[in-house]
């Protein structure tokens, strides 16, 4: 597996642990629908969080969350709609980003941005 794939999987593992520690229940990981993929789908109480995980090395030019553009947002909305229709329940859903900055010498810096965008923002 390529080094960047290993880095991405490591970041997703960190995000999953973070969510579990914050009392989320992981419903599924790497959910695919057509060309879209949702990194993590989690639930806390009556809310389903559609979570995009972005990570960078600490020397990166931009923050990880800045890499989530309109195209990715549209794909997340498409996949989330399919997932929620398959489930058939009426829980509230939101789109979150977990932004992780990893340094060789320090603990990863994890920032959880709840409600990072609204569906109306990408249409």
Image: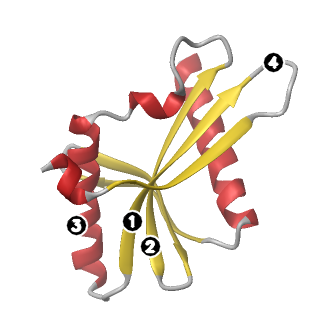
The residue depicted at 37 percent of the width and 84 percent of the height is 91
- Relative to 64, 109 lies left or right: right
Mark 4 Cα shell of 10 Å, populated few (<14), some (14-19), many (≥20): few
Q: What residue sits right under mark 4 in the picture?
A: 104
Mark 4 → mark 3, Cα distance in angstroms: 38 Å
Q: What residue sits right under mark 1 in the picture?
A: 94
Q: What residue sits right under mark 3 in the picture?
A: 81
Q: Which mark is residue 53?
A: none
On-image quarter of the N terminus? top right
Helix, strand or loop at label 4? It is loop
Q: Are marks 2 and 4 in contact (CB under 8 Å)?
A: no
In primary-sequence order, the first of circles 3 and 2 is 2
- Relative to 96, 88 lies left or right: left
Q: Quadrant of residue 92?
A: bottom left
In primary-sequence order, the first of circles 2 and 4 is 2
Mark 1 Cα shell of 10 Å, populated few (<14), some (14-19), many (≥20): some
In primary-sequence order, the first of circles 3 and 1 is 3
């Amino acid at each position: 597996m390529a080094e960047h794939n290993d880095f991405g999987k490591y970041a997703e593992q960190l995000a999953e642990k973070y969510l579990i520690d914050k009392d989320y229940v992981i419903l599924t990981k790497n959910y695919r629908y057509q060309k879209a993929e949702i990194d993590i789908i989690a639930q806390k109480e009556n809310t389903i969080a559609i979570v995009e995980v972005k990570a960078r090395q600490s020397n990166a030019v931009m923050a990880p969350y800045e890499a989530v553009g309109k195209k990715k947002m549209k794909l997340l909305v498409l996949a989330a709609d399919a997932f929620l229709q398959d489930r058939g329940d009426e829980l509230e859903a939101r789109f979150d980003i977990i932004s992780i900055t990893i340094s060789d010498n320090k603990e990863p810096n994890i920032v959880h941005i709840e409600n990072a965008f609204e569906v109306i923002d990408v249409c």
